[in-house]
Every structure is written in C-alpha cells, then in structure tokens.
Image (cartoon, grey):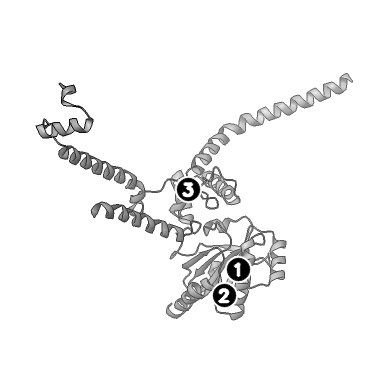
Amino acid sequence: MNRHLLPLGIFVVIAVFLAIGLGLDPREVPSPLINKPAPAFSLPQLQQPAQTFSHADMKGKVWLLNVWASWCVACREEHPVLVELARAGTVPIVGLNYKDERRDGLRWLSQFGDPYRLSVYDYDGRIGIDYGVYGVPETFLIDKNGIIRYKRIGVVTPEILRDKILPLVRELNGNA
Amino acid sequence: MRKQLAVVVIALCSAVCSLGAHAADALPTESALDKRVSALSQDLRCLVCQNQTIADSQAPLAIDLKNQIREKIAQGLSNDQIIDYMVQRYGDFVLYRPPVKAATLGLWFGPAALLILGLVVLFRYLARRRREQPTDAPLTDAEHRRAQMLLGVTDKESK
C-alpha cells in the first residue's frame, strides 16, 4: 500500500507546483514600491513644454499614473479603456509619456483621444527608472498621501479596472 | 606629387599622434570605470529580457541602467549603494544572485536538503536490504536434490 502511495504523493506535489507555476506570469515582477511614497518628479508637460508638473500637485487626490508611449503597441489596446474611464470621471489619470518624441506623443493623443488630465514628458526615461518601469504600459494607483497602492504591469483591461482598480479607488477615497 | 604625399603623411601622422595622446590620458581612468560598470552590470538582471544580465542585454532599458550605473559611480556612490538604488526601484528580482532571506531559504538550501534526504533514504534502503538478505546457510538435502533436478544433473554425473 505504502509503496504505491509514495510515488502518487510525489506526483501530486509536483503536479500542484507545476499547476501554480503555469498560472504565474513571470513578466509580472512584484514592485518594491507598493505602499511606499511615489518617487518625486517634476517634469515638463507634454502639451506645454514650458510648464512643469510635479507629483506634489496631485496631493490630496487619489489618482492614476499611466506610463505610455506612442511606440508602445500594447498601449493601443489599453487606450480605449482609459478614454472610457476618463469619460466616467471616476479617477484622474496623469500620463507619463515615456522615452517618446514629443511630436509622436502629441500625434498619438490627437489620433486616439486624450484621457489624461495632462501628460508629463520623460524623454530620457529617468523618472521611469525611479518608478521601476520596465514594460510599458504600466499604471500606478496613488493615494491622497502620495503612497503607491497598486501597480499594474501591462495592459489595464476592463476586468482589471473593474475588479482591482476601481474597488481600490473607492476604498481609498472613502477611508483616507 | 611628392609635396602632396608629404602632406598626406603629415596629416596621417598627426591624426595617429593625437589619437595616441588622447588614449594616453583618457584610457586608464576610463577603463577602471568601465570595469566597475561591467562588474556591477553583471550582477543585475535585465527586466525586459529576464534571463540576461544588463551587461549582456542590448535592450534600451539595460542601456539606460548601465548609464545610470556610470553616472552613480561618477557621483561617488559605492557599489553597495548602487545595488541598493536598483533594488529600491526594481526589487530583489533585479539581483542575479538572490539574497539569503526567509523567502529564499528554499531556493538556496532546497537542493542540498533534497540531496541529503535522498542519501538518507538510499542508505536506509541499503541497510534494510543487507539485513533481510539470507545468510550463507548450507542447503538441506531436500533443497540440494531439488536444485540438481532443476539443473537437470543426475546423481551419477554429480558424483
């Protein structure tokens, strides 16, 4: 009896580990920035290069920081979701135009619509590095005290918006 | 013709000389810096192409991070400070050699533990088999006859 149960047990353990492994996305690296203050930035705006915008300007609001670029293919997939969200006006979205040409970024916005309250322009990707950005698009949910509460690496799908981001936005707006 | 040749030779010479002079004063410090940059970047993982170090990777992010390392060295940061800078932004995953902590104990010591477990099982199995093996008792007469019968040996031949 024991002799047959042992291999079966080993098989079950391996199968469980492999099943868990299949469900994980290796590209989604947990960010060390969760529950830490959002890194400071003060960058020129995309539309008005002469004006700067800083993370401190959003203090007291729950907001989304969305990292995007005109060269980013997945951003096209995500964009309608953000446009829809902006239309609903649930949460302000600030864009971080990452390693892009200003001209291309502006053309992208006029072509696909502009869901952003404004976009800041990170030409050399320096602020991207401070935020640990490695795969555009990335989206950060930042609370009223400037603490990062959630990070999405990759496309914000309607499901993720509905199941993860919007409940958190409601919670942060209610409690803080 | 000869004059033109002379001009060319002089131009070439001065080009080579200026190269040499430039190399002489720029290279030593630069190569030390390069060495530190490449040593550090061999310990850091590129998050875009996850099985490469940023030293191996040509992804734009890896190039940016190498430039960051160079800049931080120029600012006088120590290697540990630069590694901390990366970990603060990208987490432990950025380290090619994961740190020993509670979450990584299995990673670091799991294989050795499995090896020891395997050896223990093996030795216990061998010991049990040795215990259970019959001793070299001589065959009884009945067994002897049966063995001879099975082998097809007649009494006559065996004697």
- B77 on left or right of A74: left
Q: Nearer the viewer, mark 3 or mark 2?
A: 2
Identify whether A69 is placed above or below B59: below
Residue at 15% across, 39% down: B131
Do dots 2 and 1 share one subunit?
yes
* CA separation in Å, label 2 and label 1: 16 Å
From the image, tell me which residue sits under label 2: A92
Q: Position of residue A59 (x, y in %)?
A: 51, 72
Q: Residue at x 58, y 51 (%)?
A: B61
Which type of secondary structure does the marked residue at label 1 adopt? helix
Nearest the eye: B139 or B152: B152
Toward the viewer: A100 or B2? Answer: A100
Q: Amino acid at mark 2?
A: Pro
Q: Is residue B24 above or below residue B44?
A: above
The residue furthest right is: B1
Q: Dot 2 lies on which element? A: loop
Judged from the image, the secondary structure of the residue bearing numbered disc 3 is helix
